Image: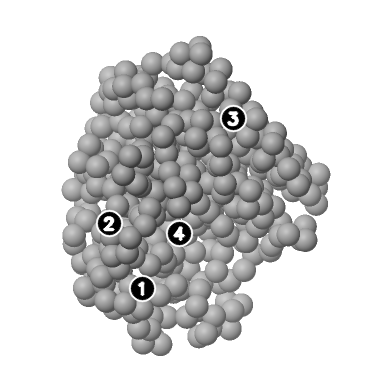
Amino acid sequence: MKNSSCIIGFLFCLFFIGCSDDPNVMLESMASEVKMPPPTAARKQYLLDSAAAYYTNWINKAGFSGQYLLAKNGVIIYSRAAGSAKRETNEDMTLETPMHVASISKVATALAVLRLVDQGKIALNQKVSHYLPKFPFKEITVKMLLNHRSGLPYYGYFADANTDRKTVLNNEDIIRLMIKFNIKLNSKPGTHFAYCNTNYAMLALIVEKVTKQPFPKAMQALIFTPLDMKSSTIATSKTQYDEFCRNYDQNGMWNGFTYLDAIYGDKNLYTTARDLVKMDRATYVDSFLSDSLRTQMFKGYSYEHPGTRNYGLGIRLKEKKGKDTFFFHTGWWHGNTGLYCSLRQDTICIIALSNNMNKRVYNLGPLLKACGNYVVNDEE
């Protein structure tokens, strides 16, 4: 299943992009400059048939509403959009409709942080309090936030317990609540993995601190503009939430704006499957992310317990001896569910996004086996 020439071709970019010290200077677009060989006709047809069968037989069932695609070497082989972006106004879902991708946002946030590490503006092993002086836990590092080994509790729990649940909170409010109510860590930092959205809300604040820009503008400069992700933005307000693609629960009801919906970094990325392919493609390119940091991003950090599951820097993974590592990230917030897969040994990207609480998007099943030698089920 492997094609070494494709992988080698992925790693070269003939256009060098300089990193400006001025955070207001947008990086030059690189999406069209990534050089990669197209898939062979036979491989393309095989992947197209596999992706189409998976969509027909699995994804496009029970009223699927969202976007789905498979890309090889940065080339989209198969893509579909179905359902409704806004049922209230009869707006159809299209491949150009920006969708809330929930925790898939963490991949983009991690890449922004790592790009700033490449620029010398952030150090992975530096204490978070170096960048955020009011942050109350002095032993936690930036890397511990990225790989979920900080021990921080989920902000939703202590916000529910200590606020009126009506006043809209922002990222700064999380630190304020931790201090005011003397919130405790769930575990000693660096001792074990515990997935927690608070980590990525803090990373967004660090990005703001070092770039001296609001997080949405920093993400535009670091990620969206250089990759020509024209359909991508970070939402921060109820107005945006109401205007953008909506999400629906299992009963078909719209999940309205809540007091936690202005917090970003862990979520609030609105994008398309096509834009996510551009982001995935860039992770192979040294001018976007250095080889050293790419290696650190795509490796596991938590081996306290046996099993196939692990977490890198902003990416989930399944790994087992004799299998190629499966890199991915899921998303789930309100009615938004999604799966982003980066099959790096075969340079394949698969994305499935839904805005109507469709858990089918999490199960790749036979499609993953058709793409390469990857772990599909934990018991394999």
Question: Mark 2 vs mark 1: which is more N-terminal?
Answer: 1
Q: Position of residue 180 (x, y in %)?
A: 39, 86
Question: Mark 2 vs mark 3: which is more N-terminal?
Answer: 3
Question: Mark 3 vs mark 4: which is more N-terminal?
Answer: 3
Question: Mark 1 vs mark 3: which is more N-terminal?
Answer: 3
Q: Residue at 48% across / 49% down in the picture?
A: 377
In the displayed structure, 229 sits above or below 149; it is above
Residue 326 visible from this viewpoint: yes
Q: Residue at 36% across / 39% down in the picture?
A: 323
Compute the Cα span from label 2 to label 1: 17 Å
Question: Mark 4 vs mark 1: which is more N-terminal?
Answer: 1
Compute the Cα span from label 1 to label 3: 39 Å
Question: Mark 2 vs mark 4: which is more N-terminal?
Answer: 4
In the displayed structure, 78 sits above or below 85; it is above
Question: Which residue type does callout 3 highlight?
Answer: Ala
- Judged from the image, the secondary structure of the residue bearing numbered disc 3 is helix
Answer left or right for 295 relative to 87: left
Compute the Cα span from label 2 to label 3: 32 Å
Q: Which mark is residue 81?
A: none
Q: Position of residue 41 (x, y in %)?
A: 50, 12
Q: Which mark is residue 301?
A: 2
Q: Quadrant of the N terminus?
A: top left
Residue 205 visible from this viewpoint: no
Question: Which residue type does callout 2 highlight?
Answer: Tyr
Identify the residue under disc 3: 51
Identify the residue under disc 1: 152
- Judged from the image, the secondary structure of the residue bearing numbered disc 1 is loop
Identify the residue under disc 4: 266
Way the structure is coloured: one colour
- Residue 206: name its quadrant: bottom left
